[in-house]
Amino acid sequence: MCGIVGYVGKKDCTDVLIDALSKLEYRGYDSAGIAVFEKNAIKVEKTKGRLKDLVDKMAEDGKPAGHCGIGHTRWATHGEPSDINSHPHGNKRISIVHNGIIENYKEIKDFLIKEGYGFESETDTETVAKLLDYYYDGNPLDTIIKVLAEIEGSYALGIIFRDFPDRIYAVRKDSPLIVGVGEQENFIASDVPAILKYTRDYYLIEQDEICELTAEHVRIYDTRKNVIEKELQTATWDIDAAEKGGYEHFMLKEIHEQPKAVKMTVSPRVKNGMPDFSETGLTVEKLKQYHQIFVVACGTAMHAGLVSKYVIEKIARIPVIVDIASEFRYREPLIGEGDLLIVISQSGETADTLAALKLGKQLGADTFALVNVVGSSIAREADMVLYTNAGPEISVASTKAYSVQIAAMYLFAFEVAYAKGKITEEECRKYVSELMEIPDYIEKTLECKTICQQTAAKLMNADSLLYIGRGLDYALSMEGSLKLKEISYIHSESYAAGELKHGTISLVTKQMPVIAVATQKGLIEKTISNIKEVKARGAMVVLVCGETLDIEDGVADCIIRLPEVDEILMPAIAAVPLQLIAYYTSVLKGCDVDKPRNLAKSVTVE
Ligand code: F6R
C-alpha cells in the first residue's frame, strides 16, 4: 500500500524524504515521488518504478534543494503505475500525497470539471488536490476542513501550500499516520520505521485530526479547529529492528527472530504459571459466558486463526468459526451478543479486518484484537486488545507475525479451556509450560536450514505443488502453501490429505511435487496412506514429521525431521521448515523475496 512521508527542519529535505520512503518500501509500491519547497516554489519529482529510479531521475533533472516537503510511494489502485499517476498531485499552489481511497472521487471530479478544472491523471487523489485548490482562501486549516466535509473513503494526506513554505499539513481517516517529533525538525509518516533514524518520539494521529508542522512546532486540531493535546509516544524498538542486521533479506531475519518474538509475546501473559489476559480486560468470568468464538482475519493471520480453531475446539469444546474478513463482512454473519469476535492482524490496518471488527461490534459481540502494530486502527477500535510483541515485520511475507499469533492463540485456548472447566489447573499449567519452551524448539528447528535449501533446489522448477496434511497439519500447510506462492510465484494448493482422492489426485504426476506434513500422532497412519497414494502416481514427496517417526523406505524422497512436543503445539515448530522452503525457493529463483510483485504489506483497501 502507499506510503507517505513529510519533513520540515534544517536537513536536506530530499535526502530525508528518500531515506524515510526507503523504510516504507516493505509496504509495496510501483512508483515514487516528492514535492519540496525550493526558493518558495513547489518542485515536484516523480516517476514510475523504484526509489532508485526517482533518485536517477533527480540526478538528471536536478535534485530539489530545500528544507520542507512531502514524499510518497504509490501502490496503484486508480490508474496503472505511470509517471502521471504517481504522487504528489496538485498544481503550483498546492501539492498532496495520499494513502487510501477516495470513494466519491467521481462525483467530485465531475463537479470540478464543471468548475473548469482539468485533470491529468486517472487517480482519485488528484480530485482531492484540486478540491483543496477550489476551496483555498489563504487559510490552509479552513480549506482542509471544507474538503474533509466532502470526501468519503480512507485517507492519510500530506499537504503543502505554496503560500506557507515552512509547513506541512496532514490528516487521516482509516489510513495510518504518525507525526514524528524531533529537535528543530518534525516529520509525518505512514509508519514509525520511516522516522526512527531521526527520532523515536511520535504522535499517533486519530481519525480526522489535522496536523500542522513547522520545524519548531506540531499543532493538532479537530475539525472544529480546537487544539488537541496528545500524549507523545516513544518507539521502544530501535533502528536495528527495522534494518536487516546482516541477513540477506528481512524475511530470513524475521524467521530467525521467531524464538525471541514468541518469548516476548507469551512471557508477559503468564503469571504464576497460568495464562493472564488481565491487561486486556478479558476475564475468566467473561470467557465462561461466550457461546461461540469467531476468528476473522485475512491471509496469514486467518491461517493462524485456523490453527487456533483446531486447538480451542479440541481442548475447550466451544465452537470456533474462522472466516476470511472480506467474506465475513458481506455474508450477514450469525454473530451477536454472547459471542466473542477475535480479529487477528499484524498491521492492524487491514481494511477488511477493520470492517469485520466494526460489524461484529455493531451486532453486539465482544471484540478482541490480536495485533502487532501498537496504536493501529484495529487496536483502537476493538473492545479488548492484546499486542503481539514481534517488533516490526518488514518483509511482505509474514513469518514471525504468524508464529506470535499462533502462540498468543494457544495461550488463549488454554485460558478458555480452563475457564470452561474442560481442563484442570494442573493441565493448564502443563500446557503453558510447554508453550514457554517453544522458543527453544524453534531455535533448534532453525537448524533444518540446509535440508530446506536442498529441498528448495528440487522444487524450484516445478510449475505447481500440493501441500497435504490432516487436522492441525492441514491448517498449517495452508500457510506453507501461501508462503511458497507469494514469494516464489509457483502455484500451490493446500489440501486435506483425505480429500485428495475426491478429485484433486487426478493432477498428481511426476511433475507435481507434494509436501506432506505429518505431526499429529493420531492421524499419521492415515496421512502416510495418502502419501503412498501420491507416491504411487509418481509425485516427488517431501515429508515434514517428528524426529521419532518410523517411516518405511521409499515413502518419501526427502524427510525433514522436527523436534517433538505436544502434538497441539507442533504447528509452532513445523511452520519453520515451510517458511524456509518458501524462502530458499524464492532466492534460488531470483525473485524479490521481501517485496513480491503485486503485494503490499499493509492492505488498506478492500
Ligand atoms: C502473507 C501476508 C498476508 C497478510 C494479510 C493480513 O504473507 O502477510 O496474507 O497476512 O494481508 O495482514 P494483516 O495481518 O496485517 O491484517
Image (cartoon, rainbow, N blue to C red):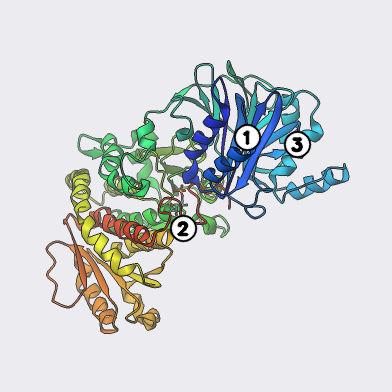
- Residue at 33% x, 40% y: name it: 284
Q: Which residue is mark 3?
A: 91
User: Which residue type carries mark 2?
Assistant: Asp
Q: Are marks 2 and 1 in contact (CB under 8 Å)?
A: no
User: Which residue type carries mark 1?
Assistant: Gly
The quadrant in which residue 372 appears is: top left
Please state which of residues 349 and 67 is positioned toward the viewer in this rendering. 67
Q: Pick whichever of labels 1 and 3 is earlier in the sequence.
A: 1
Please state which of residues 14 and 522 is positioned toward the viewer in this rendering. 14
Q: Which residue is mark 1?
A: 62
Q: CA distance from mark 3 to mark 2?
A: 45 Å
Q: Which residue is mark 2?
A: 323
Please state which of residues 294 and 26 is positioned toward the viewer in this rendering. 26
Q: Secondary structure at mark 3?
A: loop
Tell us which disc is closer to us: 3 or 2: 3
- Residue at 43% x, 45% y: name it: 346
The tally of labels here is 3
